[in-house]
Amino acid sequence: GVKFELKSGDGYPGDRISYTSPSGTAFVSNQRIVFLPATTTHETSMDNGDPQTVNSFTIPHGNLQDQKFVQPLFGANRFEALATPVAGGSIAGRATLVLSFKEGGGFDFANIARKMSERIRETGDVPPYEEELPGYDGPPAEPAMQAAGGAPGYPDEAPPGYEHHEPSRRPAMALALDFDQTLTTTDTLSAIAAIAKRKHADSREFSWFTKQYLADYAAHESRWAQLTANRAVSRDLLNRYLESVRPVEAASLDRMSQHGLLAGLTRADLYTGGRLVQLRPNAADVVGQFLHTRGCHVCVVSVNWSADFIRGALDASGVDSKLIRVYCNDLDFDTSTGVSSGKVRPRLVVAGDKVAAIAKFKNEIRQQCGGDPLLVYAGDSLTDLPALLLADIGLLVGQSSRVTRWCHQLGVEFGKPRTSEGNRILYRLHDWASAPRLIDQAVGRAHL
């Protein structure tokens, strides 16, 4: 069925009037929109609160302005418009009309309504409001027929000239998530090293590996600055820079493998250690909502060292990791003992590897669903920026100054659609609780 809402007034005492109906049937013709409630609804006035029965609603296309179709990630798709008063009608001032299509069909409805309004504006041929409509007397005492909208007592044929639309399929969505400091409150690589240290107290301190890595990275930055001193900033330069870090990252993984930093660990050790990780506030709830949203597919794309560790963190927070594809580096385990040799298998080392993993994930969804999914990516660091910019909707978690600086130099504005790139958009995500709203906002804008 279709939920109906109509609100008018400025909010001052005596001005606001609200009409609502939880379920009914909406029709669109070449002249008007009609809504018939499944049961009679009531008007509540702020003047005295006295209810008045409302049997139906109708409005000509010429009296609808600012029409838009909103397709939220959570909840029903809805048609919204500003309704202007009709001579002799019951609405004295402008009102907001909202039709929520709980069983689909909203896109077709909104598209036809928009085309009819455009045709009327172009030709100037506004049908008279006084045109006689088919009578409606409410449901009979013992209904014998049922309409497509599921309301007993309505005829199974729509009024002449009206069209009723079946549900349309919501496009698939691919949600790709970085892990460390995107979903988690802190970087967790040191936590993995601490699990191994508890098993081998005589092994090298993790701080030694960190020191070696930072020395390599500083040398790389110095060389890169000299090579690019007079180069113009571009997407190509960003990708070249992030790829140039590969030898530094690879050397760090090789150093860990050679010294057996993570030797002796089992998958159970890593999973159990992951369960101690704290996720960002509201992150688990939002990811869980995505997982239970029809047509939404979720993956984690991370340079972390263990899929078992990531799954432990997700499961401990109430997120069912079995429903999530995890792309990351992993340890080499003895097939007979299940114990790690300490060697790290480098699968995702730099930003380009993340982009490739996401492309693979999208392709799997495309083959499964028969269409290109909408891509949402959330990340926190410069390594995530290429994926953030390639996503239809990018969510930058945190306040990375490096990402901010590169975006400024590339001319990328936060919260502003990039029309030259198919309206891709990058948001700052300060709180995971706001992620569904930002995504709904971007998707709704795409359907205007």
Image: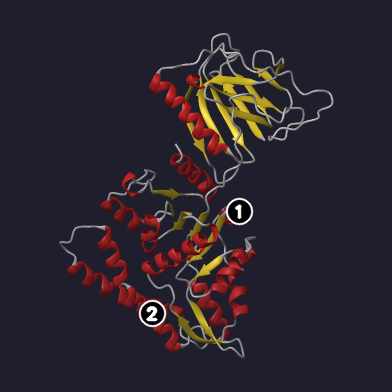
- Residue type beneath disc 2: Ser
- Residue type beneath disc 1: Asp
Picture quarter with the N terminus: top right
Residue for point 58% across, 76% down: 270
Tag 2 residue: 252
Q: Looking at the image, is mark 2 or mark 1 earlier in the sequence?
A: 2
Badge 2 crowding class, 10 Å Cα cut-off, few under 14, some 14 to 19, many 20 or more, is some
| Vertical side of 47 occupied by 348: above or below | below
Tag 1 residue: 285
Secondary structure at badge 2 equals helix
Residue 169, x across and y down, in percent: 57, 47
- Residue 179 visible in the current orientation: no
- Residue 274 visible in the current orientation: yes
Could you tell whether 207 is left or right of 226 in the image? right
Q: Nearer the viewer, residue 180 or 349?
A: 349
Residue for point 47% across, 87% down: 260
Residue 212, x across and y down, in percent: 35, 79
Q: Nearer the viewer, residue 110 or 90?
A: 110
For discs 2 and 1, the disc positioned in front in the rendered view: 1
Could you tell whether 173 is left or right of 353 in the image? right
